[in-house]
Image (spheres, rainbow, N blue to C red):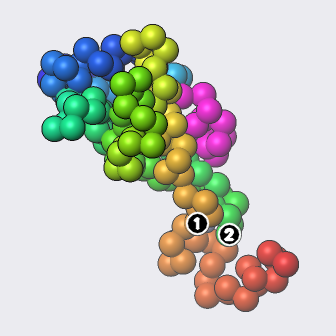
Amino acid sequence: MSEGFLPQRINLPQLADLGRQMAGRVKAEALPRLAQLAYEGRIGDAFATLDFGVDIQGWRYVRGKVTCPVSLQCQRCLGALENVIASTFALSPARTDVNEKAFPKHYDMIELDGLQVSLTAIIEDELLLSLPMVPMHAENVCPAANGKDTLLEEQQL
Ligand SMILES: [Zn+2]
């Protein structure tokens, strides 16, 4: 296990063949697409744990978990809503020796750029996919709630 910051790019096939594990942070500044969707661009460093390997059918994979503190805009009161976005994923690169149709459904396919892949982009993509569609405070803490759900319905029309 190496702690600290994760490398920006990785050689995925090599790490998979070695069965490596990694855990570390990705700086908030390296996640600009996520920051763009955050309330006033407020996000923290992401933290990820990654497990590389080769499954019994010969597919190289990376399985991981990532969390990141992200401020979102509550769609009810339009104020800031502090969140920790969490995602788990299992990815595998396509293979040239196997028909594309045989790609296992329990992985998402990732494109390799040579042998390298941007780990930062993988992590940012996973976080983007895990953002709530309609972020909202819980009703008991949202300043605009107070049981006035009918008001919200009118505003949305
Ligand atoms: Zn709210």
Start and end of the magenta stretch?
31-44
Residue 38 magenta: yes
Quarter of the view holding residue 108? top left
Locate the C terminus by quadrant: bottom right
Q: Amino acid at mark 2?
A: Arg
| Residue 156 image position (x, y, % from top left) | 80, 75
| Residue 73 image position (x, y, % from top left) | 64, 55
Q: Is residue 22 visible?
A: no
| Secondary structure category for the residue under label 2 | loop
Q: Is residue 107 visible?
A: yes
Residue at image x 54%, y 51%? Answer: 131
| Residue 76 image position (x, y, % from top left) | 68, 69
Residue at image x 38%, y 50%? Answer: 105
The residue that mark 2 highlights is: 76
Q: Quadrant of ligand 1?
A: bottom right
Q: Which mark is residue 17?
A: none
Residue 126 lies left or right of residue 97; in this view the side is right
Specify whether tag 2 is near ligand 1 (CB below 8 Å).
Answer: yes
Q: How far is disc 2 from disc 1 in space, using C-alphas?
A: 6 Å
Q: Is residue 80 above or below residue 97?
A: below
The residue that mark 1 highlights is: 136
Crowd class of label 1 (few under 14; some 14 to 19; many from 20; radius 10 Å): many
Tag 2–tag 1 contact (CB < 8 Å): yes
By secondary structure, the bulk of the magenta-drawn segment is best described as helix
| Residue 26 image position (x, y, % from top left) | 40, 25
Residue at image x 23%, y 23%? Answer: 16
